[in-house]
Image: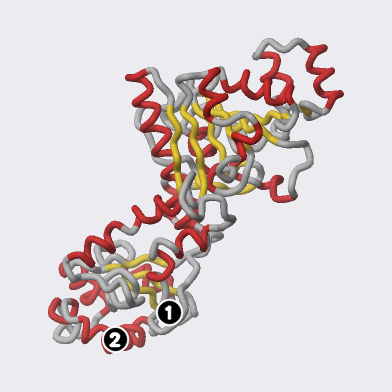
């Protein structure tokens, strides 16, 4: 039984950050019911990890009867999450006003890039646009080169999913005291702005240059905090910031201690030259040879693994950090709880696999469900089994 066992979450099917938030809530034990538009799945759906642990109901939200069924479902829920542009839910007739009318204690979670208001609120956008507006994209990359796109981890999932989940959990705690629901406006631009807190803090005391890439302690400028190519064309990640960790690294690699010392660490003018010297030294062995020497120490060195390699690293393997679901390895639920552990309840369900069961639980009779299906208001998968 997970920490959210007993809570019901309604998720409007979408892409990216909202589905990830639903996945995290399901992993923590919530009953997550995903409301899908149809049975016609995108090919990506066949391996969509974010669908694990969720039920699926297909409703036509553009029909009056479909909206009625949706609001009936909302009346039984603790949380609703949606990722549409501002105004879409209101236009459908299932916005906060309608939902609170049937469930005053509902947490209405809204996931967008720009937020519910502001000049850009109704504009299209993607992760790269949201992180560009916060200074995050500008900060990532090599000096004199264009910014590097950090996958869609920073905006969609770091500034998006995680802040939506945090907002929902905080709101649930407050609702437990007040008995009142509320809207959670989770905007990726807001989340990413918060992720940049350390850069702003360092800049405020003159220890970070916000205008230049690869000019600071944690952006690849420091020779002791960067990646290095090895003899086999693979890479090591070095993060020996603290002097005692750095001295251990210098000792194990066999570097000249009169050159690689704490004074050099503290002098940015020496960083470029020492970086080249260190790069030459680390090309003398393969990645795995260096790891055998350095990884089991406080040198703060680790291999740069591909996503295919990561599940098989001894540390990840020992912690069961990945588990097989739907025929392939997926990251295991996180974080970990000592008394109420999270788990993957089941793999991906067919779209509409739970329509009949959920409607029946709402008091809709079997013959009425058949009629609704014939009208196209709902859709039921042929088999409710996990696929």
Residue 69, by quadrant, is: top right
Helix, strand or loop at disc 1? loop
Residue appearing at x 25%, y 68% in the figure: 240
Compare residues 267 and 299 and report the one nearer the observer: 267
- For disc 1, the neighbor class at 10 Å (few under 14, some 14 to 19, many from 20) is many
- Against 335, is 231 above or below? below
Count how many numbered circles sit on residues in the image: 2
Helix, strand or loop at disc 2? helix
- Against 320, is 274 above or below? below
Compare residues 179 and 41 and report the one nearer the observer: 179
Residue indicated by mark 2: 272
Could you say where residue 128 lies in the image, as x and y percent from the top left?
Answer: 51, 63
In this image, 28 relative to 337: left or right? Answer: right
Q: CA distance from mark 1 to mark 2?
A: 18 Å
In this image, 151 relative to 347: left or right? Answer: left
Q: Quadrant of the C terminus?
A: top right
Could you say where residue 226 lies in the image, as x and y percent from the top left?
Answer: 34, 73
Residue 380, by quadrant, is: top right
In this image, 188 relative to 211: left or right? Answer: right
Compare residues 276 and 285 and report the one nearer the observer: 276
Residue appearing at x 85%, y 24% in the figure: 375
Q: Is residue 171 visible?
A: yes
- Against 241, is 274 above or below? below
Could you say where residue 5 lies in the image, as x and y percent from the top left?
Answer: 47, 23
Residue indicated by mark 1: 230
Q: Residue furthest front?
A: 119
Residue 82: numbered disc: none
> Mark 1 or mark 2, which has the lower sequence index?
1
- Against 67, is 326 above or below? below
Q: Residue furthest right?
A: 374
Residue appearing at x 53%, y 26% in the figure: 97
Residue appearing at x 20%, y 70% in the figure: 207
């Amino acid at each position: 039984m997970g920490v959210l066992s007993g809570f019901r979450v309604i998720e409007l099917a979408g892409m990216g950050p909202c589905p990830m938030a639903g996945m995290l809530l399901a992993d923590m034990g919530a009953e997550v019911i995903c409301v899908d538009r149809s049975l016609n799945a995108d090919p990506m759906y066949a391996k969509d990890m974010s669908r694990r642990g969720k039920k699926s109901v297909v409703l036509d939200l553009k029909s009056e009867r479909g909206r009625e069924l949706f609001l009936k479902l909302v009346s039984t829920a603790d949380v609703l999450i949606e990722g549409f542009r501002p105004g879409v839910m209101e236009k459908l007739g299932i916005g906060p006003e309608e939902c609170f009318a049937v469930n005053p204690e509902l947490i209405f979670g809204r996931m967008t890039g720009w937020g519910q208001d502001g000049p850009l609120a109704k504009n299209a956008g993607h992760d790269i646009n949201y992180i560009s507006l916060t200074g995050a994209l500008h900060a990532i990359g090599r000096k004199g080169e264009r910014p590097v796109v950090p996958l869609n981890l920073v905006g969609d999932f770091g500034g998006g999913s995680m802040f939506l989940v945090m907002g929902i959990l905080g709101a649930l705690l407050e609702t437990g005291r007040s008995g009142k629901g509320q809207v959670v406006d989770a905007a990726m631009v807001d989340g990413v702005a918060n992720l940049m807190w350390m850069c702003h803090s360092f800049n405020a005391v003159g220890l970070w240059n916000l205008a230049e890439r690869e000019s600071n302690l944690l952006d690849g400028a420091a020779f002791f905090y960067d990646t290095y190519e090895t003899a086999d064309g693979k890479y090591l990640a070095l993060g020996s910031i603290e002097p005692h960790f750095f001295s251990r690294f210098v000792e194990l690699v066999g570097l000249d201690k009169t050159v690689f010392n704490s004074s050099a660490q503290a002098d940015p003018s020496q960083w470029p030259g020492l970086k080249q010297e260190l790069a030459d030294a680390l090309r003398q062995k393969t990645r795995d040879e260096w790891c055998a020497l350095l990884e089991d120490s406080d040198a703060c060195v680790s291999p740069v693994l591909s996503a295919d390699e990561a599940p098989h690293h001894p540390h990840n393997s020992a912690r069961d950090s990945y588990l097989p679901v739907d025929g392939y390895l997926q990251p295991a639920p996180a974080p970990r709880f000592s008394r109420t552990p999270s788990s993957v309840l089941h793999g991906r369900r067919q779209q509409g696999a739970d329509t009949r069961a959920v409607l029946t639980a709402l008091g809709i009779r079997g013959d009425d469900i058949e009629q609704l299906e014939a009208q196209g208001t709902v859709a039921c998968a042929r088999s409710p089994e996990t696929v």
